Amino acid sequence: MNDFTGNKNFNISSQTVSASCPSNIALIKYWGKYENQIPANPSISYTLINCKTNTSMEFVADEKFSVQTFLSGNEEKKFAEKIEKYFRNIEEFLPWILKGKYIIRTDNTFPHSSGIASSASGFGAIAKCLMELEQQFSGIQDCDFKLRKASFLARLGSGSACRSLYPGLVVWGTTKEVENSSDLYAVQYPNDEIHDVFKSFNDWVLLIHEGAKSVSSTVGHGLMNTHPYAERRFQEAHENFAVLKEILKNGDMPNFIKLVEHEALTLHAMMMMSDPAFILMKTGTLAVINKIWDFRKETGLPLFFTLDAGANVHLLFPADSDEDKIKEFIVKELLQHTQNNGVVKDVMKF
Ligand code: DP6
């Protein structure tokens, strides 16, 4: 069942619900979108485990619609405005949504300034809370549908958030390589088509630059609309899915590394070729990338990187017998390029 239009028969009451949702890191990147948060190309990400947002949502029925938000106990008026706009936007799918007042409290398990996608975990957790309320008010029972609709609603808040609803490797955007993939919500990449080497991975995020980015993701996506290389990039993402599918099946680590780093550099190359151009990498980002390449050349160990829309570097390496040597190298050689010895350690295991 994929009809997300809301049931007009509902019965509201005051409730407090809560949910937790992790962040995710993309391997094939979403960069560029059409109206209504339709992605210009398919993307795939690892869902993290430790980096998450915990949210509680108090709904007071029959009060005038309003939203109050608290982040780590502090009131955040700007965020409340964003959520209010979001709720108005999704009324078609949750017809009861404007019939009360909300007090939303959220906490992230990772530092706010880290640049880890808090919009992904944040909107993921809010969408889950909304589906808890929907279940109470409209009585839906189908758990798969509830999760799929949460992913659908999260996407309308922030595109990449829709992937955070599922664990493991998650795909968003229609691709012929993944059955049932959709532009409207994310689906889990089939577990039995993933070699074991990819099921237990470290993601250590080096905090090269803490603080606000010079250009937001929303603006970056927008610049893809007039980008001279956009069509080629969207096409390449499709091609990369076919390549990645084989890699995931065969456990082909060298080609996995090649593809993931290429995707990260392509994302930033697109930014540099936008009009106006912008650069989110910092000196430290480039220093770390070069050191990783030298380290791989010298040791042959599988340490590699990906980047989000920011300066921080996600260090990826399998959780196996070589991980101690890699961790030692990170501490000795890479940490010095961070602002305050900042590193967030996460892991993907499924
Ligand atoms: C570089 O999901 O933050 O992290 O849909 O405008 O909220 P909006 O953008 P957002 O973009 C994320 C872009 C990315 C790549 C990715 O996660 O796939």
Image: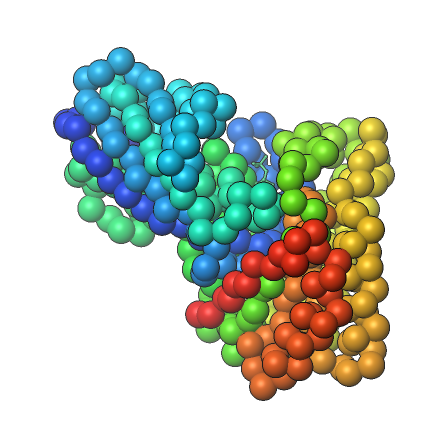
In-image side of 45 versus 31 (left or right): left
Q: Residue at x 70, y 63 (%)?
A: 335
Q: Locate ligand 1 by image quadrant.
A: top right
> Residue 25 location in percent, x, y?
58, 55
Q: Residue furthest front?
A: 340
Q: Which residue occupies the extreme bottom position in the image?
A: 321
312 versus 252 height, above or below:
above
Residue 232 showing in the rendered view: no
Quarter residue 331 falls in: bottom right
Q: How is the image coloured?
A: rainbow
Residue 18 shows up from this direction: yes
Which residue occupies the foreground of this view, 129 or 104? 104
The x and y percentages for residue 248 are 59, 71
In front here: 231 or 168?
A: 168
Q: Residue at x 37, y 46 (%)?
A: 54
Asked whether, in this view, residue 54 is left or right of residue 234, the answer is left
Is residue 333 shown above or below 273?
A: below
Residue shown at 38%/36% (left/top)? 73
The correct choice, above or below, for 226 with respect to 136 in the image is above
- Residue 337 spot, x, y in % from top left: 75, 58
In the rendered image of this protein, does residue 242 appear above or below residue 283?
below
Query: Position of 189 compared to 298: left or right?
Result: left
- Residue 146 picture location, percent across and down: 30, 45
Position of the N terminus, as image quadrant, is top left
Q: Residue at image x 55%, y 33%?
A: 37
